Amino acid sequence: MSDAQTLKHITGTIALAGAGKMGGAMLSGWLAQGLDAARVVVIEPAPSPEISALAKQGVRLNPSAKDAGAITALVIAVKPQSFREAGASLKPFSASSTLVVSIMAGTTIASLEEVCGGNVVRAMPNTPASIGRGITVAVAAKKVSAAQRSVADALLRAIGSVEWVEDEMLMDAVTAVSGSGPAYVFLLAEELARAGVAAGLPAELATKLARETVAGSGELLHRSDIASATLRQNVTSPGGTTAAALEVLMGADGLQQLMTRAVAAATRRSKELAK
């Protein structure tokens, strides 16, 4: 059964708590893949015009837990710092056997079980989810059944690809690599443009070249089965311009060391924020 078919065949109601950028992206993906709008409940105290418009398509906006019907899955996409406060209002939407899928950074399975109960899947997506090109890593609590894991997988695949791990302790490093990773790529584009200006290019042209180079290279990496190291080597002629630049980037204080330190710092901070 395909992911789209799985979404169409989910029984009961899907409740989405938090319909900001990430939650809204998930909702759009579900509807695009055929999930019946009438079986979606959105819990969002400050809905955007886009979310409010979906109510005209059948999505139920801010019903009471009693009126929501049997909840198959509660997907929590609120800001992590708001979770404890929002938890009391979410608890009525979760029974002991309800699938609870969280995409909140730094919020542990134990915290989710304490506040909301249910059978918990903790997931970490990233911002390319807004265009359906995200990567999400998920870990399931022991109580989650195979059928519930399949439902969670289908819901998460609406915003991109999904990888599953068995060890929740890996989620801090996941957050550091893929959760925060888009910012590293955007910084690369930013600094490449800045370096182009320093080399004499007009700012507008330098920005265009940097953005298109990063975007095009990312798409090439996405479409190719060739290892990233091989793709890099394919661009590099011995003694050429690329080799001269890579000698700097791959030096003793180069990108490898900086990236290792950056990911380690993000991992440490994720552990500090865990709750």
Image (cartoon, grey):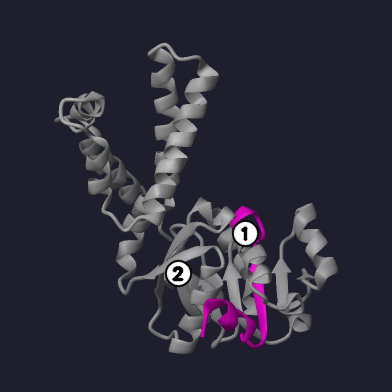
Residue 97, position in %: x, y?
Answer: 54, 88
To which residue does mark 2 refer?
A: 122
Q: Quadrant of the C terminus?
A: bottom left
To which residue does mark 1 refer?
A: 25
Q: Which of marks 1 and 2 is nearer the N terminus?
A: 1
Residue 216, position in %: x, y?
Answer: 45, 42
- SS under mark 1: helix
Is any atom of residue 117 visible in this view?
A: no
Is any atom of residue 2 visible in this view?
A: yes
| Residue in the foreground of this view, choosing between 221 and 164 | 221
Measure the C-alpha gap from mark 1 to mark 2. Answer: 18 Å
Residue 226, position in %: x, y?
Answer: 28, 54
Residue drawn at (43%, 71%) of the image: 109
Count neighbours of disc 2 (C-alpha within 10 A) and say few if under 14, some if 14 to 19, many if 20 or more.
many
The kind of residue tagged 1 is Ala
The kind of residue tagged 2 is Arg
**Quick check: 256 above or below 170?**
above
Q: Do the residues labelled 1 and 2 touch (CB within 8 Å)?
A: no
| Residue in the foreground of this view, choosing between 104 and 95 | 104
Residue drawn at (58%, 82%) of the image: 5
161 to the left or right of 238: right
Residue range highlighted in magenta: 1-24
Q: Disc 1 vs disc 2: which is toward the camera?
A: 1
Q: In which quarter of the image is residue 246?
A: top left
| Residue in the foreground of this view, choosing between 25 and 273 | 25
**Quick check: 192 above or below 108?**
above
- SS under mark 2: strand
